[in-house]
Image: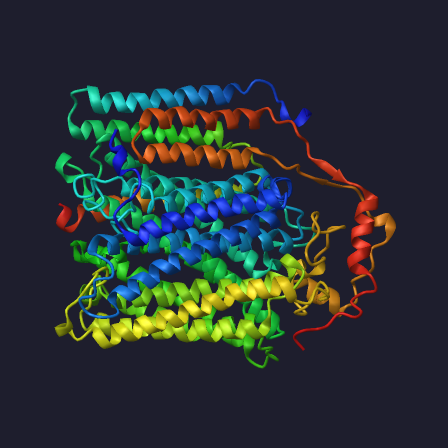
Amino acid sequence: MGIKWDEFFVTGDPLIFASQIGIALSLVGAIAGITYFKKWNYLWTEWLTTVDHKKIGIMYILLGVVMFFRGGVDGLMMKSQTAVPENEFLNAQHYNEVFTTHGVIMILFVAMPLLIGLMNFAVPLQIGARDVAFPQLNALSFWLTASAAALFNLSFIIGGSPDAGWTSYFPLAGKEFSPGIGNNFYAVALQIAGAGTLMTGINFIVTVLKMRTKGMTLMKMPMFTWTSFITSIIIVASFPIFTVALALMTFDRTFGAHFFTISGGGMDMLWANLFWLWGHPEVYIVVLPAFGMLSDIISTFARKTLFGYKSMVVSIVLISVLSMLVWVHHFFTMGNNAAVNSFFSITTMAIAIPTGVKVFNWLFTMRKGRIKFTTSMLWALAFVPNFVIGGVTGVMLAMAAADYQYHNTLFLVAHFHYVLIPGVVFPIFAGLYYWWPKMFGYMLNEKIGKWHFWLFVIGFNVTFMPMFFLGLDGAVRRAYTYSAETGFGPLMLLSAVGSIILAAGFAALVYNIYWSARHADRNIGNDPWDARTLEWATASPVQQYNFASLPEVTKLDAFWHMKKNNELQPLSEDEVEEIHLPSNTWIPIYMGAVFGISGFLLVFEWTIAAGIAALGIFVGLAFRSFDYDEGFHVHKDEISETERKWRKGGNKGVKNHVS
Amino acid sequence: MDNHSKGFPISHVIGFFMSLVLTFGAAWIALQSSLSMTAVMWIIGTLAVIQAGIQLYMFMHINESNDRIANNINIIYSAFIAVVIVAGSIWVMTSGHSH
């Protein structure tokens, strides 16, 4: 029983006290609001128990956007702390907690949910399927992720946040040096989130292999589907490593084992080794689906088939293999011998080759295309130069000898932000603007979108470009303060100003979502971008069964060719058949809750209580085993009615927003 | 309902008990026996490989698929991942300062 009751709530910091009150008030407000508007039933039947891949995707995106706010506030706090020398806005401990949660949240609860959300929404539609292979498992994935995010976020008001960095290296992360329970939140919450992600990986491998519509061979799949497929394979290969590492960490911290604890003969650097065996592939897990989205978006708005489709596929497969072979470049300075460091230097540089192929393919796709500068396309265009800066500095860091100079400086921090923000966040924004009409039946406003774009891209560069130079001048990462004599002040201040512009960009996105939900034109048809892939062949927003009759595919860019060859016939009555769909279920959200409660108790090292709560997991498994619900059928009349509505008069009266 | 029931899953039960025996056997050898460190390593390593085989045959139905190409790709890829993780970790952790 590690924790004392008087340490249960975090006390003594006015910022955190304000957050505690804020969280309590907004919880009460949300519950009161839902009760007042009598929305509990709607929420339960339409969202919380749904197994529909589109709604699960939207919930993932909502989670990602909310967490983006949380992680962004962490980032702003760090930037305000370091804006001037010897600042006393945050103390060292608080700063440690903030950069730790910033990293964990941005990778695991922002990038992953946003990408998996878009995968959930788009992949089944792109392959002409009615859902993923295991809809209920999909809901479970989401609820485990959501419950882990809730548990992790709880840490800063209850019990204290983890403070050993998002990498949580031993020996710092061990019980000796971090005796509080903060790091237990890291071990347990990420374990739960990882389980959810692993299930997503399995689900999408099976979905892509088994659920493709007639005629869609692997080499006719849209590029986003390809990258999602390869990403799922990397997830299945690498997440179990993290699961094992976190389990060992939990044993060390909670049960006094010594896998990584030096005092008992453990190997502290084995944690770093296992962490990066997962952590490096994780980089490709987040960046590959983003590459896929960009490919589809660039090809749509350049109005050309993707250049070098086959070389794209070969590149992503190569990246997936190489991604497993580079992990040591994160700890060149550990003191390996020359052979190890040289090997991993070379594999790391080798990754630049397939990535370079992809960059040239995108450029050649745009060459002689008639580019439409929509907001979505702007993100894709901004991606190329910004990401190349990240990539090239990556090759600099890949040289083991030079890395001793860059290691743990702000140069490295600037590098990975230049990879992850243009490489993941820009494409996610591009994807949101691109698929928004398909999700909700209206577009995000293009004008506010351009504000969002320019503020964010300028803010991003002003924030992170100075960090390259600060790093080369010797500014270390994760340092909460510096003296005026270092001369870091002006660039640090510039970087802080940039982060405010960056935040204004995010605010523009949030305002855009609000504005568009209220005022955007609903009469946009099913294909507002004149796009190329199958998701645009059905209604916007997509009806629950996706396709009244499953499309048949003969070529890459199937929908484009259907449009060009006038193969889009109105649906005839006798084609309509009853459609079988899975029923809603309470089990996934229940499992999320039980995992969350049990995890919470384990964080506090109340192991017996955690064990008892974990029995609830087996109850859920038992209910699932005896669940003989065979789903339901959508009747012909209902299908005809739905189809008539959106196909009414072709696309007459629809305003084309992009031409 | 027919496709749900294929009789009692005897192979799963055998596989489950064999996994338990192998796991507890490894723990017993590591914790209770007085063999040398090297001997313990070799024994539990061997048990781990047997365990992996049981998992593949009893639970992952490696021999039930008709698609030989897919099967081979899966096995080669899994072997690649296993070698990278195990051999790679040993190489990295035993070279340089951690010696």
Check the image and report above or below for B63 versus A545.
above
Please provide percent x and percent y for residue A304.
Answer: 62, 73
Q: Nearer the viewer, residue A487 or A383?
A: A487
> Considering only vertical position in the picture, is A28 above or below A491?
above
Give the residue at x 56% y 28%.
A624
- Residue B94, position as x, y percentages in the image: 18, 45
Q: Is residue A551 left or right of residue A252?
A: right
Q: Position of residue A198 (x, y in %)?
A: 45, 43
Q: Quadrant of residue A371?
A: bottom right
Q: Nearer the viewer, residue A595 or B66?
A: A595
The answer to whether residue B13 is left or right of residue A49 is left
In which quarter of the view is residue A67 placed? bottom left
Image quarter where the C terminus of chain B lies is top left
| Residue under the point 16% across and 55% down | A337
- Can residue A284 be seen here? The reply is yes
Exactly how many numbered labels are in the figure?
0
Taking depth in this image into account, of A83 and B3 the one nearest to the observer is A83
Q: Is residue B73 visible?
A: no
**Quadrant of the rendering where the N terminus of chain B is positioned:** top right
* Location of residue A387 by image quarter: bottom left
Q: Nearer the viewer, residue A73 or A197?
A: A73
